[in-house]
Amino acid sequence: MRSADFIGPSPDMGRTERSANPMKLPTSAMKHALRSGGLVAFVLSLLPPSHLGAITWDFAQAGDTEGWVAWESEASGAVIRVPLHSETVGGVWRVSPRDFAPGIRPIVELISPPIGRDSALFNRVRVRLRVLHTQPLESQITLLWKNPTNKNHLGFFINAPPRTGIDHITLLKSQRHTYTADWQEVMIDSVASKTYVRGDKIYRRAWEGELLEIRLRLSLSNPSQDVERPEEIPEAVEIDWIELTHAERPDSETAPPRGEEPHPVGTLFALPLFYPLELHGLDIGQRGRPVAELGDLDGDGDLDMAAVWEDWQPRTNSGSAGWLCAFNEDGRFSAKVRIEQFPEIGPIPRLVGADLLGDDRMELIVSSGRSLDLLEPSSAGWSVARHIADEAIPLGIGDVDGDGDEDIWLTEFDAKTSVRAVILLNDGEGQFDEQMALAPELGEFDWFPMRLIHHVPGGRRTGLLWGGPDVGSPHDYMATYLDDHGETIQEYLRVDAAADLICYAGDLDRDGDTDMVAGRAVASMAGSVLTGLDLLINRGDGVLDKIAWYERGYVQQDVVFSDLNEDGLLDAVFVDRDFRQPALVVNIGSKNGVPLREGHYPLQGLGGTIISGDVDGDGDLDLAVLEQAVRGGGSGIYILSNQTKTDD
């Protein structure tokens, strides 16, 4: 906060303009209204904005943003966008920009609730705001919107389909603006579909069909200059009201769209407790890529956390990466972390860990390139206990041969076009000289190892899912298992889901064959946009039927299955990275194999990879969720304490 530098009016000044009697008009205004439109026009002029053909959000209730959310804009240059701290007090929505960071511009993006009206009903947006800063800011304001044209796109500037005579489609309109500490009414008007030419390109602005949402992007710095000092960041943006209207249609709407009601919170877990970490840039992971583990790092019997971090500087197009260790102190995580760096930065960092040396501590295998070492912790840091492999990446860790020791799964690259899955068997003393390969009979395809199979069917010890060539739908997969006698079992699978959407493979309904969970995606010219989750249930003959499970949401990481309430059925948890209501979603297993929704546990940021373990030492499985950024802060970890034992 820089309130001492603020030279504008106090936060409460200026509110009297709207809270005073709206019926009181100067005589000259009354005469002008009567001359220009008669009595009806005069009466309309006396009414507040919501009755002038407008949807108006006035933020009148304390603590209620009426469905609007505030985020750092993707145009800021930040690698990790952060949700912005905001509050509504005294009829004003106050939003704090991100704190100063080199190379990052203070650009606030205000995102409306879902609107669901015909775009033709509106052609302008008005907003009453002020920016609390030491001096006026000459910059710009941009209106952006979502409609059927970019519903399945992540952006607002897209390439037009071929052979349309258009190069690009835009869903935005910008104008210059000078922000001041005094209240201002800003209007972006004449918003309509339009084709125009700039240089040698033809553009089409698409304002049509159902208006899904609008956004106001407030650029709070000079776009031609870098932000170099913390005092250049404004203290806050205050919004009095936002109005969506049409200049010529005075159709009133008394109840503006407010978005969805909050999802019901469950009771199986306590609400998430967030523990900030002093190092920003936590890698939250992607589907099928391990980046974090829970295990005892310091020998005190508590589960600590090791996770990948990345620090990328967009200003210099450079950075560093490594892993951090966060320590559990009686169920609470300290902000102090131990940091290690990768010797080189690889494209896909991975981290797996377990007690590999039999010393009751977690060792790590980390991968930044394709050279793998087994690392053991000490008070002085990490040291290389074993060199594991070259030209390989870790898939996971587990007891493959049933001797009680943790073995290592690798993907090994024999040549540029050849890969194989290798299991390194632990001899009980941390030596991994014996190895075995688990591969399908290749037949006509070149298969590639994708992920370990969890909850393998009965009579089988461990399994691996392989993907075939992407030659259209349905897609071909292969599950290979080791049975209790060390023999390979092979299961051919066919399913309507691409490999990059698979977020679980295993026998989730416990009927003896391999099922999957996949993200539902809508293809677009900008890539796939995830819109929910499907269960892919094996009929028993290798064909997997699709069952709609989670209708909406953005699930970027794996779905985690485990028996959380100790009823013998597999429960499922995942993070829904919906920017309006991000949450950990818990689903309780049922006898028909379809987990049923138990509740949403709200997160302060978008969340990330889930790892499970008995963090508080009470005998049941708790959950840890990685987080890149929260409102007003940086990276950290949520802990959700399982209440099963507590309730007993």
Image (tube, rainbow, N blue to C red):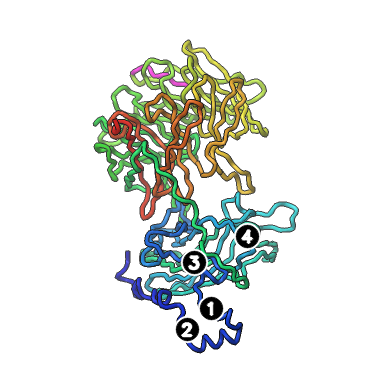
The disc, 3 or 4, on the residue closer to the chain's N-terminal end is 4
- Name which residue lies at 41% across and 57% down: 84
Query: What's the distance in space between the residues labelled 4 and 1, CA to CA?
Result: 25 Å
Query: What's the distance in space between the residues labelled 2 and 3, CA to CA?
Result: 23 Å
The disc, 4 or 2, on the residue closer to the chain's N-terminal end is 2
Mark 3 residue element: strand
**What numbered label is drawn on residue 45?**
1
Q: Label 2 crowding class (10 Å Cα cut-off): few <14, some 14-19, many 20+?
A: few
Identify residue for label 2.
25
Dot 3 amino acid type: Ile
Mark 4, mark 1: which one is toward the viewer? 1
Of residues 256 and 508, which is closer to you in this image?
256
Of residues 218 and 582, which is closer to you in this image?
582
- Name which residue lies at 49% across and 88% down: 27
The disc, 1 or 2, on the residue closer to the chain's N-terminal end is 2
**Residue 123, position in %: x, y?**
61, 67
- Name which residue lies at 66% across and 58% down: 168
Identify residue for label 4.
118
- The answer to whether the residue labelled 1 contacts the one labelled 3, judged by CB atoms less than 8 Å apart, is no
**Residue 154, position in %: x, y?**
57, 51
Is 172 left, or right, of 166 in this rendering? left
Dot 2 amino acid type: Leu
